Image: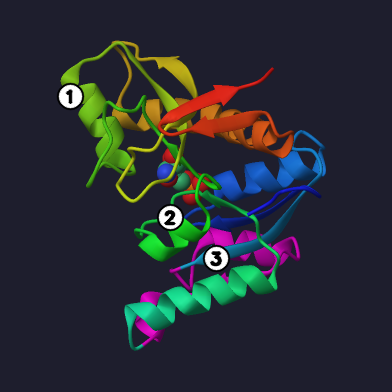
Amino acid sequence: MSASGGLKIAVFASGRGSNVRALADAIQAGIISNSTLSLVVSNNSICGALEFARQRNIPALHISRSQFRTDGEFTASLLITLGNFGVNFIALAGYMKKLPVELVKAFKNRIVNIHPALLPEFGGKGMYGMNVHNAVIERGVKVSGATVHLVDEEYDTGPIVLQERVEVLPSDTPESLAEKVLHVEHRLYPKAISLFAMGKVHVRGKEIIIYE
Ligand code: GRF
């Protein structure tokens, strides 16, 4: 999968869609250079992410496993659709489904995810949304943050591209922490994807080297 000629990004999302907005804005502002937001895909027909994409005239598709008879047909449809839109890079932004293994293989080292904590802490199955922030506050740690990582076949285990820390204050609640982390996400995700757009990210096995 080559990205010469820039990134053609598909964002996969299931919910609110604030990171889709942050990425669309960053592309428009040139913070992510030479790239297009080609497509937004959601498993959820009624969600903020699809609604936002439609408002901005970004192709927006509801594609869900339940529309297909078999896993194979679902995966084939995803791959064909991504091909039709010329997609060469995928960003997950609150996508609540595991991607088919064939898709992860077809886009090896070309799929990123954003996670609202400092991986490898507070990651893995079940660690999504407010579950993450509840766990952080419950454990009483002093620092949380956001992580952008490559997606492999497991949950939240791929090599880390960028992280940013957020201080957890004694007065923080899971809600206030979520708000602070989300604010950081909206800056960190465009920054990480812009590194890919500029060809500055090199992956060697489990190791990521970023050329500044
Ligand atoms: C974000 O907190 C992201 O880290 C997590 O899911 C949330 C998605 O938020 N993976 P939004 O739909 O982009 O507003």
The picture places residue 172, in percent across and down from the top left corner, at 33, 19
Residue at figure coordinates x 66%, y 61% from the top left? 87
Q: Residues within 10 Å of mark 1 (few under 14, many from 20)?
A: few
Of residue 116 and residue 150, the one placed in the foreground of this image is 150
The nearer-to-camera label among 3 and 1 is: 3
- In the image, which residues are magenta? 43-68
Q: Position of residue 148 (x, y in %)?
A: 48, 33
Label 3 vs 1, first from the N-terminus: 3
Q: Is residue 182 above or below residue 50?
A: above
User: How many angstroms separate mark 2 from mark 3 (CA)?
Assistant: 9 Å
For label 3, the residue is: 41
Separation (CA) of disc 3 from disc 1: 34 Å
At 55% from the left and 65% from the top, the residue drawn is 41
44 versus 199 height, above or below: below
The residue lying at 68 percent from left, 74 percent from top is 84
Q: Residue furthest left?
A: 139
Q: Residue at label 2?
A: 95
* Disc 1 residue type (three-letter): Glu
Number of callouts: 3
Mark 2 C-beta to ligand 1 under 8 Å: yes
Which numbered disc covers residue 138?
A: 1
